[in-house]
Structures are given as structure tokens and as C-alpha cells.
Image (cartoon, rainbow, N blue to C red):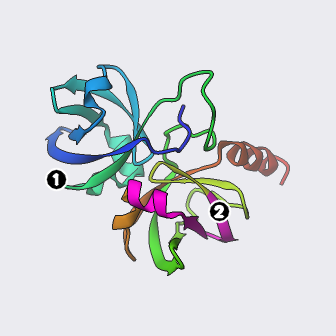
């Protein structure tokens, strides 16, 4: 379980395809604190550390993960958002994030607004996911508040700190992002469909 508060960023330094799996090697400033079998959120995708070196670590994404996330499009040199799993008893500064990406979306607009930034994203209706005004959404692992919720589209406002300390500063129109919709909203939607 995660909070959506990004701890640091990492750089992709190697990619190795093995059958349907992709082994991803990441360089980050938290490597010395990691251990094999630890869960880490990578752009919102929960992956397990399978190998450690003094400067990097390796995780493996299976076909299911690649099919549902933007990890299938990563390249060496890309910057990704990282968050280690929350510790029971810590403050929950974001919202409950599972690290299970529901689907991808596309950035359709980026606007600077007097020191802050507004990003707009669209997503396909295939999975019947929804957002609500002032509800929670996770974009590339970042816990955010929805503004301007529409059918298959929403915006978020980004403060300068988030812009500088996540990969949001690399987003442009057309950038593919990972979306995890609010888990409570997903349960409520599933329950309501039973009565329709």
C-alpha cells in the first residue's frame, strides 16, 4: 500500500526483455536503503526488487503490467517517480494507493498558472472508470485532487514542489501516463452497477 506522495525519482539505466517479462534497472538515491523482495511504486506501478547493486536495483514487469501501464513505452534515460510502501502507523499524507494501475491516459493540455501548473488528461472509457470533482486520483503514482471532472477527462493542479520533484516537469501534450482511480470509488461503482 502506498500514499501517492513521491519519495524520489529514478533513472532507467537498462532494460532487458525476457520472454513476456521486462527487467528494468533503475538508478536512484534510495538504493542503499532497499532490500530484495521490497515493494516500490514505479510511476504508480507496484513492482518487487529482485536484484541490488551498489548504485541500482532491478524490478520485473510481467506482460499484464506492461499491457495496463506506460512501462511498455519506457526507454533508457527516462525519469520515473518512486515511492516505497507505507509503514503501518505513519501519517497518510496522500490517499490510499494500491500500486495497481487501472489504465493509461494521455496528457492533452499543460498550462502554467502564476507559478503553478494545470494538467489535463483524457482516458478511454473501456474500463468504466470515473473521477469526481475534488476526488482523489493517482497519476504516475502521484496522489492528486481532481479538478474539472468530465466524462473520460479531468484536470489536476500541481504546486511547484511537485513539479520539480516528480516527472511531471517532463509531461507534454501526448505524454502517456498511468492512472489509478480511487479504490473507494471503484467499489461504489461496482456495487451501483449491480442495481442498474
Helix, strand, or loop for circle 1?
loop
Camera sees residue 22: no
Q: Is residue 160 left or right of residue 47?
A: right
Q: Is residue 172 left or right of residue 78?
A: right
- Give the vertical position of 72 relative to 32 (above or below): below
Q: Is residue 148 magenta?
A: yes
User: Marks 2 and 1, Cα distance to the nearest angstrom?
Assistant: 31 Å
Spot occupied by residue 83 in the image (x, y as percentages of width and height) = 43, 38
Q: Residue at x 26, y 25 (%)?
A: 32
**Residue denoted by label 2:** 146
Q: Dividing the image into 4 quarters, which one contains the N terminus? A: top right
Labelled pair 2, 1 in contact (Cβ < 8 Å): no
Q: Residue at x 20, y 25 (%)?
A: 52
Camera sees residue 140: yes
Q: Residue furthest right?
A: 195
- Give the vertical position of 65 relative to 111 (above or below): above
- The span picked out in magenta is 145-165
Q: Is residue 148 left or right of residue 157?
A: right
Q: Nearer the viewer, residue 176 or 188?
A: 176
Q: Residues within 10 Å of mark 2 (few under 14, many from 20)?
A: many
**Sooner in the amino-acid sequence: mark 2 or mark 1:** 1
**Residue denoted by label 1:** 76
- Give the vertical position of 144 relative to 85 (above or below): below
Spot occupied by residue 76 in the image (x, y as percentages of width and height) = 16, 53
Amino acid at each position: 500500500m502506498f500514499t501517492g506522495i513521491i519519495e524520489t525519482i529514478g533513472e532507467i539505466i537498462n532494460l532487458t526483455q525476457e520472454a513476456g517479462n521486462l527487467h528494468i534497472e533503475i538508478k536512484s538515491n534510495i538504493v542503499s536503503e532497499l532490500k530484495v523482495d521490497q515493494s516500490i511504486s514505479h510511476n504508480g506501478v507496484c513492482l518487487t526488487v529482485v536484484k541490488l547493486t551498489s548504485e541500482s536495483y532491478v524490478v520485473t514487469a510481467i506482460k499484464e503490467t506492461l499491457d495496463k501501464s506506460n512501462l511498455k513505452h519506457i526507454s533508457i534515460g527516462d525519469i520515473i517517480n518512486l515511492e516505497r510502501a507505507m509503514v503501518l502507523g505513519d501519517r497518510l499524507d496522500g490517499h490510499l494507493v494500491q500500486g495497481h494501475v487501472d489504465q493509461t491516459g494521455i496528457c492533452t493540455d499543460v498550462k502554467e498558472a502564476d507559478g503553478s501548473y494545470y494538467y489535463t488528461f483524457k482516458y478511454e472509457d473501456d474500463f468504466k472508470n470515473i473521477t469526481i470533482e475534488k476526488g482523489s486520483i493517482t497519476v504516475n503514482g502521484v496522489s492528486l485532487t481532481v479538478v474539472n471532472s468530465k466524462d473520460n477527462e479531468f484536470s489536476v493542479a500541481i504546486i511547484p514542489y511537485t513539479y520539480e520533484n516528480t516527472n511531471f516537469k517532463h509531461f507534454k501534450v501526448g505524454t502517456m501516463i498511468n492512472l489509478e482511480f480511487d479504490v473507494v470509488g471503484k467499489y461504489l461503482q461496482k456495487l451501483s452497477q449491480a442495481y442498474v
